[in-house]
Amino acid sequence: MKEQLEKIKLEAKCSLEKATSLEEINELKVRFLGKKGELTQVLRGMGQLSPEERPLIGQLANEVRDELNSLFQERVAAIKKIEQEQKLQAETIDITLPGKTFARGSNHPLTLVIEEAKQIFIGLGFEIAEGPEIETDYYNFEALNLPKDHPARDMQDTFYISPDIVLRTHTSPVQVRTMERLKPAVPVKIICPGKVYRKDDDATHSPMFHQIEGLVIDKGIRMSDLKGILLAFVQQMFGPDRRIRIRPSYFPFTEPSAEVDVSCGICGGSGCKSCGNTGWLEILGSGMVHPNVLRYGGYDPTQVTGFAFGMGVERIAMLKYGINDMRLFFENDIRFLQQF
C-alpha cells in the first residue's frame, strides 16, 4: 500500500507538469483526490492492514494528500498567471484615446419649478415650512373649516389609512400647524411645498402630485397684498409681461375666495386655442384666511387678518414648459426628461 501511495504521488506530479489549462487540472484533481479518486480507493483498503500498520499508512496518506493539494494550488496559480500575461500581450491599449463618458443627470422639471418658486418667495420674504404627508383628519379637514359633514369634502375625499388618518389632500395642514407653533407672533409668512394625494388620474390629474401653499398673517393684511404677491410671483416665474386676473370662487378655508388666472403666454391675452380663446389660464386658488381657520390656529380674527394661496406645481410646470399631459412627469421617459 505504501508503494501504491508513492506511485499515485508520482503520477499526479507528472500529470500536473503536463497540464496546460485549468480544466485539465480540475480533471486531475478529481482523478487523484476526488471521492472516487485513486487515493480514496487506496484508503478504503486500510481495513485489511494490521493494527500496527494502519497509523503509519494513514500518516503517509495524509502527507501525500497535503502535498498533492499544495501542488494543485501552485499549478492553478501558475496557469492563471500565464493566461493573464497572454491576455495582456494580446491587448493593445492606446493611452491617447479619450476615456469613456457617462451621461450626466439633471433635475426633474418638477424639482426645477419647486426650487425656482422657493427662490422667488424667499426673495419676497417668505420662509419654508414643512409637515407630514400622513395627516390626521383634524388638521387635513376640521382645522381648515371642513367638518365631517361638509359637502366640500367630496372634492378631496381620498386615501384613508384609518377613519382619522389620511394621506393629506393638500399642504394646507402645514398652515395650521405653523400657526399653532408660532401663535400669537406676527407676521407669519410661509410657503409649504410638498406632495399631496387625491383620487384623480387623467391627462391633467394624478393621484400623487405637488402643491405649494402660501400663508401670510399680520395686522391689516388685505386682498390687495395678496394680489401684489401673486403678480410678483407670476412675472418672475413666467415673464415680466404676464398679467393676472382674480375671479370670485369658493374655498371653505378662505373668505372671500378667488381663482387666479395668468395671461396666456402664446397669444399674449388676445385669445387662442391653448387658452380656449379667453386669453387666460387658471393657475391657483387663493383668498383671505377664514376667521374659523385663524381661531383653530390660535389667532384672534378681530386682531389680525391673513391671506392664503395654493398652487399645483405640475400645473405651473405644464404652463411654463408647454406640456400637455401631466402623466409625462411620472413615466420616467428619458427622452422627455433630457429636454430639461
Image (cartoon, rainbow, N blue to C red):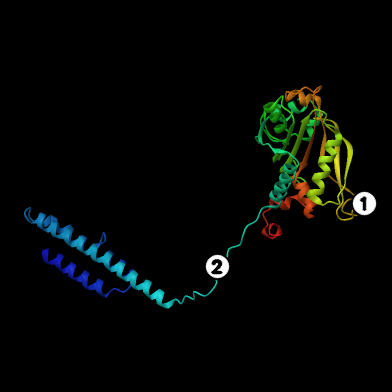
Q: Looking at numbered disc 2 in the image, what kind of residue is underneath it?
A: Lys
Residue neighbourhood size for the residue with mark 2, other residues' Cα within 10 Å, grouped as few (<14), some (14–19), many (≥20): few
Question: Who is closer to the viewer here, 30 or 110?
Answer: 110
Q: Looking at numbered disc 1 in the image, what kind of residue is underneath it?
A: Asn
Which residue lies under the disc numbered 1?
Answer: 277
Residue neighbourhood size for the residue with mark 1, other residues' Cα within 10 Å, grouped as few (<14), some (14–19), many (≥20): few
* Rendered location of residue 262, percent (x, y): 86, 47
Q: Please determine whether, in this image, residue 6 is positioned above or below residue 218.
A: below
| Residue 12 in sight in this render | yes
Which mark, by number, is residue 157? none
Which residue lies under the disc numbered 2?
Answer: 100
* Rendered location of residue 117, percent (x, y): 74, 46
Marks 2/1: CA–CA distance: 51 Å
* Camera-nearest label, 2 or 1: 2
Question: Who is closer to the viewer here, 161 or 189?
Answer: 189
* Rendered location of residue 260, percent (x, y): 85, 41
Q: Quadrant of residue 335 in the image?
A: bottom right
* Rendered location of residue 182, percent (x, y): 69, 28
Q: Residue at x 49, y 74 (%)?
A: 95
Q: Quadrant of residue 161 in the image?
A: top right
Q: Residue at x 84, y 44 (%)?
A: 231
Question: Who is closer to the viewer here, 246 or 138?
Answer: 246
Q: Please state, as top left, top right, bottom left or bottom right, where the N terminus lies in the image.
A: bottom left
Q: Is residue 190 left or right of residue 49?
A: right
Q: Residue at x 70, y 33 (%)?
A: 174
**Helix, strand or loop for disc 1:** loop
